Amino acid sequence: MGLNEWAYSLSESLLSDPLPRRWVHSLGVAKRARALAPVLGEDAELLEAAAVLHDIGYSPDLALTGFHPLDGARFLRRQGADERVVRLVAHHSCAVLEAEERGLREELESEFELERPELVDALVFCDMTTTPDGVETTPTERLDEIVKRYGPDTIVGRFIQRAAPEIHAAARRVEGRLSQVKAADQPM
């Protein structure tokens, strides 16, 4: 079984029944990841696997700390998943800032190294340009939706507001790489 086949199967088994909306979001994030293949080269499959798995820590079967990036990454490591996928799941979408809000920053950083910045940016972009219903959106609309859903004074609300500048910067970097690839593909 290939990496992506395994990742989709695992994510579906953990999310589709107990959290169908989270499963649809994960599918949408993975679709966004596939669209980035031209800028990712050999890492395209890796990013797609991380994208479909990024929220598995929400699964009731895995939620131990209540911090889904940490719960998901720990589970994947126990399953023997590719370490790069594990690191991407652990650090997706500025997770270190939410970990700080939860008093888990030291745990996250000591257990999981950061992956290459280009891949971290790509996963941020995919997650933060996909609605909870799996539909493409803008980072601004996604951030607004998260604050409204959780409330501005909750852990998630505070963290996402702090993360907003880095989320926008990551999206700009990815969009810039996409523009360069598209420009290079244009006939002279």
Image (cartoon, grey):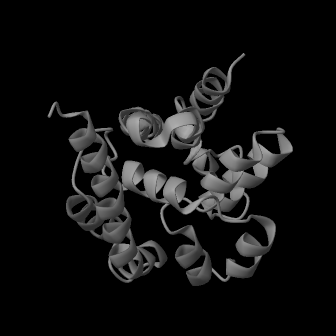
Q: Is residue 77 left or right of residue 97?
A: right
- Residue drawn at the location 45% of the way across and 72% of the way down: 156
Where does residue 88 sit, x and y in percent of width and height? 61, 53
Where does residue 157 sit, x and y in percent of width and height? 38, 75
Q: Is residue 109 left or right of residue 182?
A: right
User: Compared with residue 181, is residue 24 higher up or lower down, i.e. above or below?
Assistant: above
User: Compared with residue 58, is residue 150 higher up or lower down, i.e. above or below?
Assistant: below
Q: Nearer the viewer, residue 53 or 155?
A: 53
Where does residue 53 sit, x and y in percent of width and height? 58, 41
- Residue drawn at the location 38% of the way across and 54% of the way down: 125
* Quadrant occupied by the N terminus: top right
- Residue drawn at the location 66% of the way across and 29% of the way down: 10
Most extreme residue toward the front is 188
Q: How many marks?
A: 0
Quarter of the rendering containing residue 61? top right
Is residue 33 among what the camera can see? yes
Is residue 63 among what the camera can see? no
Quarter of the rendering containing residue 187? top left
